[in-house]
Image: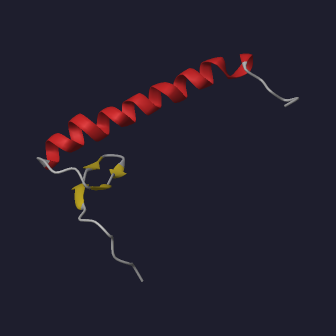
């Protein structure tokens, strides 16, 4: 059973279906604003930034080995 949040939250939903299948996305946020704009300009950009960090870690992973630590 789900509990209650202590603060007001907005849920942004993007339902997409491509030739690869369904791709639903859900975001719970306390940021007020236009949902499509919040999704595109805040959350998608954050995801791209996190993917860039992951790519850099994979590029240099062989050089930062800490197997003795």
Q: Nearer the viewer, residue 52 or 5?
A: 5
The number of discs equals 0
Q: Residue at x 53, y 24 (%)?
A: 55
Residue 69 drawn at (x, y percent) = 84, 31
Q: Nearer the viewer, residue 19 or 17?
A: 17
Q: Residue furthest bottom?
A: 1
Q: Residue furthest right?
A: 68
In the rendered structure, the answer to whether residue 22 lies left or right of residue 1 reads left
Q: Quadrant of residue 9?
A: bottom left
Give the vertical position of 54 relative to 15 (above or below).
above
Give the vertical position of 65 relative to 17 (above or below).
above
In the rendered structure, the answer to whether residue 11 lies left or right of residue 4 reads left
In the rendered structure, the answer to whether residue 58 lies left or right of residue 9 reads right
In the rendered structure, the answer to whether residue 67 lies left or right of residue 6 reads right
Q: Residue at x 28, y 66 (%)?
A: 7
Give the vertical position of 61 relative to 50 (above or below).
above
Residue 14 drawn at (x, y percent) = 24, 52
Give the vertical position of 59 relative to 47 (above or below).
above
Q: Residue at x 42, y 83 (%)?
A: 1
Residue 48 drawn at (x, y percent) = 38, 31
Q: Residue furthest left?
A: 34
Residue 26 drawn at (x, y percent) = 31, 56
């Amino acid at each position: 059973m789900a509990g209650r949040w202590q603060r007001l939250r907005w849920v942004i939903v993007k339902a997409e279906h491509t030739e690869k299948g369904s791709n639903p996305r859900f975001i719970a946020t306390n940021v007020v604003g236009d949902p499509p704009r919040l999704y595109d300009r805040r959350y998608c950009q954050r995801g791209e930034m996190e993917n860039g960090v992951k790519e850099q870690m994979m590029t240099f992973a062989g050089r930062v080995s800490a197997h003795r630590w």
